[in-house]
Image: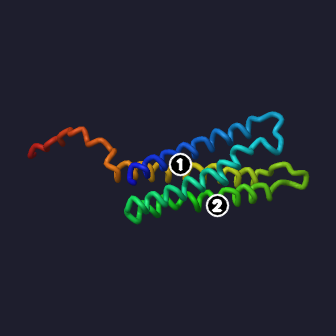
Amino acid sequence: MRKALVVISALTLVAFALQFIFAAVGGFTKPAGDGAYALHSVNGMAVIPFLTLLTVLFAALAKAPGRLIGLALLPVGLVVLQPLIAMLANGFADASGVSTPLGLTIGGLHALNGIIAVHVVVGVHRAARKLAGLVPAEAGVPAREVEPA
């Protein structure tokens, strides 16, 4: 079960990396229509939450420490926060629908929150690898002995 946790946490990490790619696809699509961010939305609202919940399930089944299970659950909250940040940013557009500096600043928090979520998922994957015993042993470099003064 621990190796399965490593695999599912790696898949979750891949989904988060793809999320940034899909955001770029939406940002660079010309002309930008309603579907420009479709891949970003589907991945962020369906694939990532599903994989994150599977990671939590596999962590529990692998009898991972409670800290790792909690850390695996944290991206769910961060993902739920994402559309709220986006809606808030869009709420600060002017009457004609043009972004305002405040709206763009809040929109930047959407990206920052995504970066934080990726950082958490990397931590979960590292902890899963350690739990499964897949982390290579230290190189065995001896510590330098300090000579008495």
Residue 125, given in percent of the width and then of the height, sits at 44, 49
* Left or right: residue 12 compared with residue 124: right
What's the amino acid at mark 1? Thr
Kindly report which numbered mark, 2 or 1, lies closer to the viewer in this rendering. 1
What's the amino acid at mark 2? Val
Q: What element carries label 1?
A: helix
Mark positioned earlier in the residue sequence (2 or 1): 1
Q: Is mark 2 on a helix, strand or loop?
A: helix
Which of the numbered marks, if any, corresponds to residue 12?
Answer: 1
Residue at the image point whose x is 34% and y is 50% from the top? 132
Residue 147, given in percent of the width and then of the height, sits at 10, 43
Outermost residue to the bottom:
66
Residue with the mark numbered 2: 80
Q: Can residue 84 be seen in this view?
A: yes
Residue 21, given in percent of the width and then of the height, sits at 64, 38
Q: Which of 61 and 84 is in front in this view?
A: 61
Above/below status of 140 relative to 56: above
Above/below status of 117 relative to 24: below
Which of the numbered marks, if any, corresponds to residue 133?
Answer: none
Q: Can residue 127 be seen in this view?
A: no
